Amino acid sequence: MKKETACNVSHGFRRAAIFILAFAISPNTYSAPKGLDIYFIDVEGGAATLIVTPQGESLLMDCGWKRDDLRDAKRIHDTASRLAGLKKIDYFVTSHFHTDHFGSLSQLVELIPIGKFYDHALMQESQEYDKKLYPEYLKVSEGKRQVLKAGDTIPLKSGKTPLKVICVVSDGRGIPTPVGVGAGVNLYCKDAPMKAEDESDNAKSIGLLVSYGDFEFLNLGDLTWNMEHQLVCPDNVLGKVDLYMVTHHGMNTSNNPVLVKTIQPTVSIMCNGARKAGFPESVALLKSLPSLKAAYQLHRNVQTSESENTDKALIANWDENCQGQFIKASVASNGKLYTVSIGEKGKPRKFPAE
């Protein structure tokens, strides 16, 4: 009896050990719940922002330049497929029809399928836009295109932590009702200066507010000064945000101080180029914000001094001839905390979602 019992105990230990080992080597065992990931892909002064949800859905806003070497299309595809594990991009949003924002689209769809396309309007010949590339856009989006208006939402699936993507501005019209936390009468509007009316397609840009739990992210494309003013004056409809993609690559025809001060971002990310935008006035404005804890740039502006850029540690690409490092924001599954890191090996910095 003792012998049999010892044998049984030994057998039981072996089974337990195998069970524990199987769990230890399984890549999916005890993995942390998925949160929301946002990749700011370097397209050298254009814009490409990839959002990947906990449910594995994706939204890409803008896609950089069309080039013979497919640089921007390949960088987006690598990020989407290799890093994010995507087989397709569910939604593509063209903020506006300038070359650096939708140029690589016809190349990108050859590398990865795109499910649905959003833009601000069916363009007319009299309007200002890239007329050479626009027919390519109409061709690849045929039968899958929809105009996105202020107040519309993009139907990404929401899980336990609420997720919402709402269009706050499109085709020169802002959302009329408050959508952000902290919205209300805006004291910054008093005596806020205006600029000459912008007749370009920049002023027609689509802007998205992404909410995930307590976390909020604002991307206004290349929206310009007077339209930014309209979004927060006389009433602030946006509220405060955690993460702000610096508008228009950090140009001084955008980033109206009344908007930037009103939304009180905790972190900013500037999708500039080594020789495109990243204007000293915009950098100085961000540095002056009491709310801001970190101001990231995709590139050092090589045309200005080091002091007129952000901290070196927060610049993804210091040298002009770079490999195109991205910046990534990852929001915890409960939407209460997020990290920001540079490239695949950068050390994440933690920030509370407020």
Image: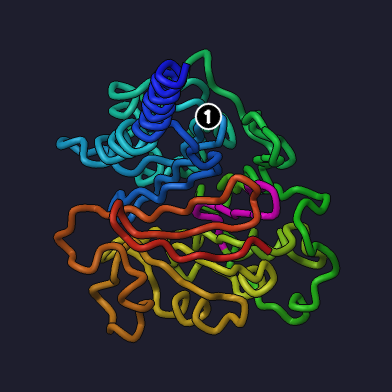
Query: Which element is circle 1 on?
Result: loop
- On the image, the x and y values in percent for residue 182 come to 79, 64
Is residue 20 or residue 352 the one in the foreground? Answer: 20
In this rendering, the answer to whether 324 lies above or below 142 is below
What residue is at 52 percent from the left and 32 percent from the top?
Answer: 123
Q: What residue type is disc 1 on?
A: Glu
- On the image, the x and y values in percent for residue 225 come to 59, 65
Residue 175 vs residue 285: left or right?
right
Residue 303 vs residue 38: left or right?
left
What residue is at 64 percent from the left and 34 percent from the top?
Answer: 148
What segment is highlighted magenta in the picture? Answer: 209-224
Quarter of the figure with the C terminus: bottom right
Quadrant of the rendered structure where residue 337 is?
bottom right
Query: What is the tally of numbered marks visible in this picture?
Result: 1
Q: Which residue is mark 1?
A: 57
Residue 40 visible here: yes
